[in-house]
Amino acid sequence: MSMFQKIVFVVPAALYLAACAHAPAPSPAPPTGPPAAGAPSLPAPNPSHDVKRYSKVIGWAEGQTPRAPEGFQVSRFADGLRNPRWIYVLPNQDILVAEASSEFKDDEDRKEAQASGKAQSQNLGNSANQITLLRDANGDGKPEVREVFLSGLRQPLGMVLVNGQFYVANTDGVWRYPYKTGETTLRARGEKILSLPAGGYNNHWTRNLLANADGSRIYVSVGSASNIGEHGMDEEKRRANILEIHPDGSQERIFASGLRNPVGMGWAPGTQTLWTVVNERDNLGDNLVPDYLTRVQEGGFYGWPYAYFGANEDPRLAGEQPALVKKTLVPDVPLGSHTASLGLAFYDQKAFPAKYQGGAFIGQHGSWNRSELSGYKVVFVPFQNGKPSGEPEDFLTGFIAHREKAEVHGRPVGIAVLPDGALLVADDSSNTLWRVAPRK
């Protein structure tokens, strides 16, 4: 019987108490799978779980690349960047790369953050706070133009062009700039159209942007300031949400809530359905809680911080919000626990084989709160008629160099589909963009 043929109910309180005293035996692998009518079978929560296994980035040797399935070739599109985190393709095919990272005052600050579980990336330091433009005019997979498109930002991530205006999401707000097709550097003065809450839990500084088809609405993803609201819910106002605004920043409303750290967003091809990937909570066990890919229902509540993956109450907040626990929606596709699933791109081109067309590619940045590494790869979820139709499968692997030593070559995160049908993957820890294309 598939794990998705089992319906899971709220774990009884007695199991919560037992889990506090005895960690459950680890499953062979964290839950992953196709969509389901109910939740996947999950282990009992273990609130005493306190594992920190950080990866060490060793980089890629000359000529070494990640591995794609047979029939594809992987090449180095650009390197020497400064924590390339996110990718956006302009209508004229120019490629924009947001270069940003967690900001620490000094090495002691970084070490303290890592020791407390607040830092996932080994490529830390002063954030570049800029967007770089790459132009591959002749389509040979090697950009001839490389310019700083926009600088002086504050931890930028999401980018979108709407009605001739370029928008960028800094950690503390959304800015808008006039844009002319072909510009390699933005020189016009921008304006801040929306302030956003910043600070808090260090991993959740990222803010993503997505516009609807007619450009009348922009969606803004804002992660939580904490793991489970342990510093009080006052600092969580307007966080763990996907917000909706008009292009001038007005009419803000919460489109969906209870999403601990939604980063990647996209529209399933041929539909008006918004999807997101969510980085779930820590310290409940090696195999809890699964990150997930889900359609985003308007007004939907997805559990954080009181419940997870449906009405599974977090034992650390037992009894606090029973009504919210009861209304928690079950996400569509679990992606494995602690995988740090962040990047999302739907394949809307024709160059890849038919099985990939319309499906979702997801960048998994990789675990730190698990005794064995998980994530550190790009996975693919097939779709048919705008809905998931199969289990997640590995697509771009080889990022883990030595599993026992917790050594990795790099960490994939943002993903973009290029107009020629190739896939571009941001490997922020090795400062590289990888290009994946059908082998000629």
Image (tube, rainbow, N blue to C red):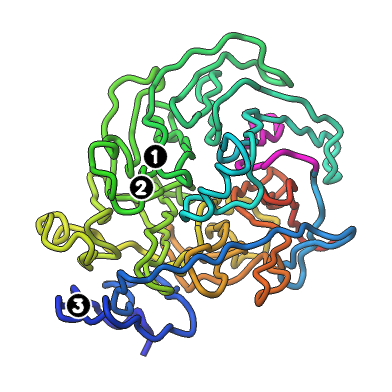
Q: Residue at x 57, y 57 (%)?
A: 365
Q: Which residue is mark 3?
A: 17
- Real-space CA distance between mark 3 and mark 1, rounded to the nearest whole angstrom: 30 Å
- Mark 3 lies on a secondary structure that is helix
- The residue nearer to you, when weighing 403 against 423, is 403
| Disc nearer the start of the sequence (3/1) | 3
* Amino acid on which disc 1 is placed: Gly
Q: Are marks 1 and 2 in contact (CB under 8 Å)?
A: yes
Q: Residue at x 15, y 78 (%)?
A: 12
Q: Quadrant of the N terminus?
A: bottom left
Which residues are the magenta region?
80-98
- Real-space CA distance between mark 1 and mark 2, rounded to the nearest whole angstrom: 6 Å
Residue 313, percent across and down? 20, 65
| Residue 94 painted magenta | yes
Residue 115, can we see it?
A: yes
Determine which quarter of the picture holds residue 278: bottom left
Q: On the picture, is 300 further left or further right than 49?
A: left
Q: Which residue is mark 2?
A: 226
Q: Which residue is mark 1?
A: 200
* Amino acid on which disc 3 is placed: Leu
Residue 60, percent across and down? 80, 59
Q: Residue furthest front?
A: 108
Q: Residue furthest bottom?
A: 1
For label 3, count other residues whose C-alpha is less than 10 Å away and answer few (under 14), some (14-19) or many (20+).
Answer: some
Q: Residue at x 38, y 48 (%)?
A: 273
| Residue 188 painted magenta | no
- Mark 1 lies on a secondary structure that is loop
